[in-house]
Image (cartoon, grey):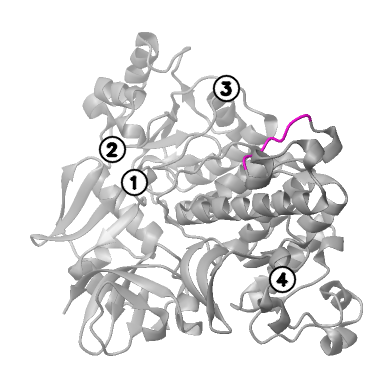
Amino acid sequence: MISLEKREGVARIGKLEFNGKVFETPLMIDFLDKPDIIDRIDFGMAPYPIKEFDEFRFKILGSKDENFIVATGLSVLSPRKLVETLIELRSGSFKPLYTPALATPKNVPILIYFGVDVVDNILPIVKAYEGIYMLENSEFKVESLRSLPCNCEICRNNTPRDLDEEMIAKHNTAVLRRQIEVVKEHIRNENLRNFVEAHAKFDPELTAMLRIGNENVEFFQRYEAVFKRSKLTPTSEDSFDRCEVYTFFERAIKAYRPKGEVLLILPCSARKPYTLSRSHSKIRSYLGDLLRGVEEIIVSSPLVVPRVFELTYPAINYDVPVTGRWSGDEIKFVAERLAKFIEKGDFDLVIAHVEGGYRRVVEETGIDATFTAEDDVTSQVSLENLKEALKGVKVRRSFDLYLSIFEHMLRYQFGIELFEFGKDFRVRGRYPNLELMHDGERIARIDVTYGMLDIYPPLARFLLENEVYTVRIDNFVPKGTIFAVGVKEADERIRPNDIVVFYNDELFGIGRALMTGREMVEVDRGYAIDVKRLCV
């Protein structure tokens, strides 16, 4: 069993104890070293794909290893069938998943992304004896090379003509090992999807696997953190269906409760949060009190972000390529989400202060909007048009933007209503580092690193009373980390990085989840919760 140390979606880093030795996953078994671990793994007598057409015989002849999920023969599968098989295998057990004779330097990032824990260098060895020289993104016939574009021990001291099959095998193995180490760093930095998305472009089959994986977003949602410290970089339309984007729209549309009668639609900015950007600062400063009681939605691609969610991940930390050109699919995708947000309000007037592709998005929604921008949204003419459009508006319902941000983030993060907790709240601090006060006590603050709320004892007690994001632990006093072995019960909604309330018969406290709620209960090893504060 893996002792989980870090999870990034389905991929994970952990310690694997086997036969008295400790290995770190993702692990590469090196057949060049004749590892003794191989003698203790049951590979079975039938490849995994045989299960598809003869499940009875597979039950008899397939692997029955107690320590690993061993799936042989997967290299013969089509991209779709391979993805479906990996999801099936990863969904059924927390045991480490080993896929013999499948990994190459090119495909190992996406294999780990889909939950493979253990690979080997069988294919790199086989390729070596076919005269194939492998790199992270490429493969070459060794006789076609004029020089060796690698700095491993083999390549530093030789020329292409010097290489024999064994030397190529050592080189290919070194490249695979190096690629796995790169993937581990992306897992630690919560950046694996960005890396996989970019890497998949080097091969049509990898791109197909990524797109097929996007069709199974519910599978990734079981493990994917809702809040991250890494930047979201949606660089292509394949990004539109990635888990973080899907989850943001799913939660934000459900949680959005606009109060104003006037909606102002604005374009995104390079700087996040938008409010601190040059363009948004200029617009807000120019309009002043005219914005009081006005709802705002910022249009980007692929995100559409009501102002009240701009401090929520991924809206607070993403970066997209800006070219000024919008594809038809891009416009349709963004317009559909914008329309869903607009439907949540009862707006008397919609003002769209946008131009170019942003205007085409608004037009695609079919919403009756007043357009005020001419060329640049911060030009004097554009700003005057916007001010004139707002001057005649009589605001019947005003609201505190900062308090509304806390209301929406609580609803988004925990599914709770702020005013069920109490009344007479006060927001203090300098934007975006805001704190929510109640009866003179701090109950929540915005954690701009993760794009979520951190909470304090009064609000934690409220979550505990309502059994929201709670974890019951054994009767001990936790210190820095709570391990899975000490967890008795956990809310199944919990994902890595979620703020949780842990408790036992004597105390309760606040922590950051390091694994899913289901894992906390079903595994007995690994880091479960990073303790933030105790509330005895």
Q: Quadrant of the C terminus?
A: bottom left
- Residue kind at label 3, given as amino acid type: Thr
The part of the image, by quadrant, that contains residue 51 is: bottom right
**Mark 1–mark 2 CB contact (< 8 Å):** yes
Marks 2 and 3 sit apart, C-alpha to C-alpha, by: 33 Å
Residue 253 lies, in percent from the top left, at: 48, 51
Give the mark nearest the N terminus, 2 or 3.
2
Kindly identify the residue that appears in the image at 34 percent across and 41 percent down: 260
Residue for badge 3? 323
Residue 34: give its label: 4
Comparing 336 with 532, the one in front is 532
Kindly identify the residue that appears in the image at 23 percent across and 45 percent down: 433
Marks 1 and 2 sit apart, C-alpha to C-alpha, by: 8 Å
Kindly identify the residue that appears in the image at 50 percent across and 72 percent down: 15
Q: Secondary structure at mark 3?
A: loop
Q: Secondary structure at mark 1?
A: loop
Marks 3 and 1 sit apart, C-alpha to C-alpha, by: 34 Å
- Residue kind at label 2, given as amino acid type: Gly
Residue 523 lies, in percent from the top left, at: 50, 82
Q: Residue furthest left?
A: 440
Residue 259: give its label: 1
Q: Nearer the viewer, mark 2 or mark 3?
A: 3
Give the mark nearest the N terminus, 4 or 3.
4
Marks 2 and 4 sit apart, C-alpha to C-alpha, by: 71 Å
Marks 4 and 3 sit apart, C-alpha to C-alpha, by: 52 Å
Q: Nearer the viewer, mark 4 or mark 3?
A: 4
**Mark 1–mark 4 CB contact (< 8 Å):** no
Residue 41, magenta (yes or no) = no
- Residue kind at label 1, given as amino acid type: Lys
Residue for badge 2? 293
Q: Quadrant of the N terminus?
A: bottom right
Comparing 260 with 315, the one in front is 315
